[in-house]
Amino acid sequence: MLAIKSGRLASIKPAGPPTWDSPLATLMIRMLYHQHQPFNHPTSSSSRISNCRAYHLAVKSSPDSTPLRRQLLSEPRPTKHRQAPQSRQGPQSSPAPHIPPLAITSFLSPPGSEKHPNPYETIADSLHDGAFKAAESEVELSLSLPAEFDPDAGNKIMQEACATHNILRIWTTYSRLKAQWNSMDIPPLNFTLYFRIMYRFKGADTATATQWARSVYEDMKQYRRPSIGMANLILDLMLRFENFNTAVDYFNSDIATFNLKPSTRSYNLMIRGHCSRGRLNDAEKIYIDMRTGSLSARADVATYSTLMSEYRRRGMQDRADKVLDEMLSDNVKPNMFIFNSVIKRLVKEKDYRGARRVMTLMKRSFRSPDAVTYSTLIDGYAKDGNEDAIASIQTEMALNKIYPNAKTITSTIQVFASSSLDKDIDRSLEAVLSSLAPGEMNDYTFGVLMNVYGKRKDITAAMGIYDHMVSTGREVNHAIACSLLDGYVRANEVPTANKIFHEHFTMRGIRPPNAWAYSIMITGCCKLGNLVDALHYYHEMNSFRIEPDATICSRLIQLYLEHHQPDAARQMMLLMRNSKLDISVHTYTMLIDYMSSIKDVQKALRYYQEMLAAGVRPDAHCYTVLINAHIRGGDYAACDDTYRQMLIDGVRPTLETFTSLLHVHSFRGNAEKVKEYWGAMTGMGLQPDLKAFTVLMQTYSLTSNVEMTEFIFKEIRNKEIVPDTIALTTLISSYKDLPRLNVARIDEITSLMEELELDPTPHYFEVLMDAFGQHNLPDRVIKTWRQAERLPKQQHWIPTTSNILHAIEACRDRGYIDTLHSVWRAATTASVPARQYGAVVQSPASHRTMLTPAPEVFTAYLNALLTHNRFSEIKTLLNDECWTMRLTPRTEDFELLFTGLAQYEFLQAELESIRQIVVERWPSVKPVVEQIILSTRRI
């Protein structure tokens, strides 16, 4: 469809009766939405965002409140990412205290004005202990047990606790009841309720809940005989969170004690446990015993499916196919999951005929291909760009009355996306919308559209969806709001994202349920280098007690380093460590690079050692930064050691790594090492870029090997690499020290710069001036100097001492006094705090920042003034400027000056006046001056 703009969404109407039923179409959108979820961001529920008051009520009264569960169940399985349950509105009898909506000044006020007192507070420390005790006491207050009650009272209270799905409440209630049983000798719970309690703990899927379930199970065994189903439940939990042998021994002990008969599920759990721990041989032994009848239980569909999944995970496709054949020979009918898994594998291998054969076998097993089957085929054809095959499958689906799902639609859109046909993508989206009945567009529908347009940076269409939802009275949930913010940040419209965040969250008094929105906004602040706003978002998270994730902390560390606040960055590292957040290699690399850039190489190496001690493995970029740190520290031998360590660790060097190594050995003039690393680079299949070629050119330029430098430059042109100013400057530099300067070739290079519209750099003028000055070309030196003076001020061109000397000599030779004065100003006036050839001194009289030039520069300037009889300027130089610069001329300067004056009788007046200035300013040199004048007159 055409991109949905503001107001356009409301005008979309279905053309005729819907071709797909609305629930299935909604499911398509939902699955498409999950495919577009941002990596490492929590998945928001479909519930709409409530206001702050409703949120606090939900936290206080809801039995399955998400923040409470996150605090109490802090050990989720790392392989599962479950959607947070929706918070339900609690009773209105005890309203929470009113929280005034936040104003714009709450996150745009000056630093230090935030309500949160400590920006470096460890969030985990402020939540876990106190929140756990508060929640537990709250549950205890809500649980009031009578002093005397009948056995059914305990069952009733326990049933009410189980109905809440809040495992903390279940455990606390059970513990209180258990205390009553122990003191009053009251009979325990019934069997069904015991099973229900342990089933609730199993649903939590944490180590803590497993310990609670075992405790309840042990209590139950004192009064009730467990069933094999209950034993399987405990076995399942123990296999997930405890030692495998311990779990099996515990299970076998109960089997023997209570004379239970292991079921097929019992052995399936053991097979799964063996597979998860890499014990494939042990899993196969149980499987063989189940097939051969050595065990009482026979293999079922789950048995074969578990082994086939493990074989596929290990890439053992032949074994997986053999298990499928054994399954068919055992007259066990595969389920749709097995059929679809085989089809998916064949499609991945581009074996579409094999996939069709499996579909035929599926039909013989009295199973019809479903939407997942067809979606898998469409996905394979979509990756190949085969639109005709996709159209054929869609026709077959229509004939079989199989409605498309979200994966089908997504794969179809991928076909157009691979061709970069945005209009076709829009038309496909419009077809999905048109298939929905009026009023059936739910939050998932809007969420998918918002996410797709956000990823495509089509912020106009994304904002149109947002405006439509607001105008029709729909509340925008957290996922949709974050997708909109993410779209604006991706499109570099960070100020607009900031405004939307304020209008959607702050002005409405809505508290974001997690760190997703803050992570997006802090990322946007990082793009702009805006530390102040990033800190305000971070402090607002603290005030809401939302835990920052590793991405947020890493972004803040990056901003601290950009603003030269390494101590604050270190504090953020400590926060991450105290909060048990993973510190990535990227974060350590930023710190190593920054410390080496400010010449604190020792601290950079300490961060590197700290990274190794934390078990973080360096990557290629980290090693490259470490090599650069060694270069800055002057430890060139350590660069080669770091490279060897990379190879030992199995880390493949990148082009940047080799470029740094080439640079250090080129700088040292070690051509053999440069050739060695160049050969290693090309041997690894890395194609050198312009920077690598330039470093190679510098190697031969330092030895004035023009032939090799020109050969490398020719290679650059042959590979159609556009040279930059640095490469051309390097080429000019190779001609600089030749006995005879090839002016024509240098003119060709400068013409090429103009042709490529390259901006000259200060180094370019430095090289040109040295080249022309060394070969006594004063006119070209003057011309180059005047061109350099027209450089933008932000480039801060600081001519070297050799540049100054060549320019002064050219002005003396050609008599360009105005240019001579500009050269002297450049040599003695500071535009930056320090210059490489002199010290900075402040002039209290003129408020000029003056430099003390190099002695040879002063001598050359004095000689130029004397050559052109600029006596008044010589007097000013000696009487005022020398005092301002705190400079004392050398003996050779006095010899030059007074020898030139004393040899001409008509300069007697100038000689006397200058001698008087010198004697008054530097009385100690009077004998030297008198001797010079006397000796000159004798000659």
Image (tube, grey):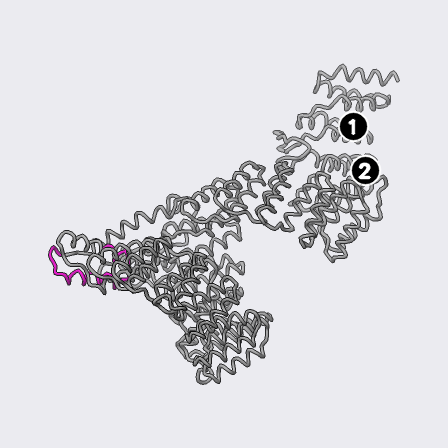
Mark 1 is on which residue type? Phe
Q: Main secondary structure of the magenta part?
A: helix
- Nearer the viewer's eye, disc 1 or disc 2? 2
Pick the front one: 398 or 718: 398
Residue at the image position 74 percent from the left and 23 percent from the top: 890
Q: Residues within 10 Å of mark 2 (few under 14, many from 20)?
A: some
Image x and y of residue 421, in percent: 59, 72
Image x and y of residue 250, in percent: 31, 55
Q: CA distance from mark 1 to mark 2?
A: 29 Å
Give the SS element for disc 2. Answer: helix
Q: Is residue 844 visible?
A: yes
Answer whether residue 157 is magenta in the image: yes
Q: Quadrant of the C terminus?
A: top right
Mark 2 is on which residue type? Gln
Counting residues from the start of the chain, the first of labels 1 and 2 encountered is 2
Give the SS element for disc 1. Answer: helix
Answer whether residue 401 is magenta in the image: no
What range is drawn magenta here? 146-173
Question: Mark 2 sits on what residue?
Answer: 774
**837 displayed left or right of 576:** right
As drawn, the label of residue 871 is: 1
**872 displayed left or right of 620:** right
Q: Quick one: which residue is furthest to the right in this view?
A: 939
Pick the front one: 403 or 785: 403
Image x and y of residue 176, in percent: 20, 54
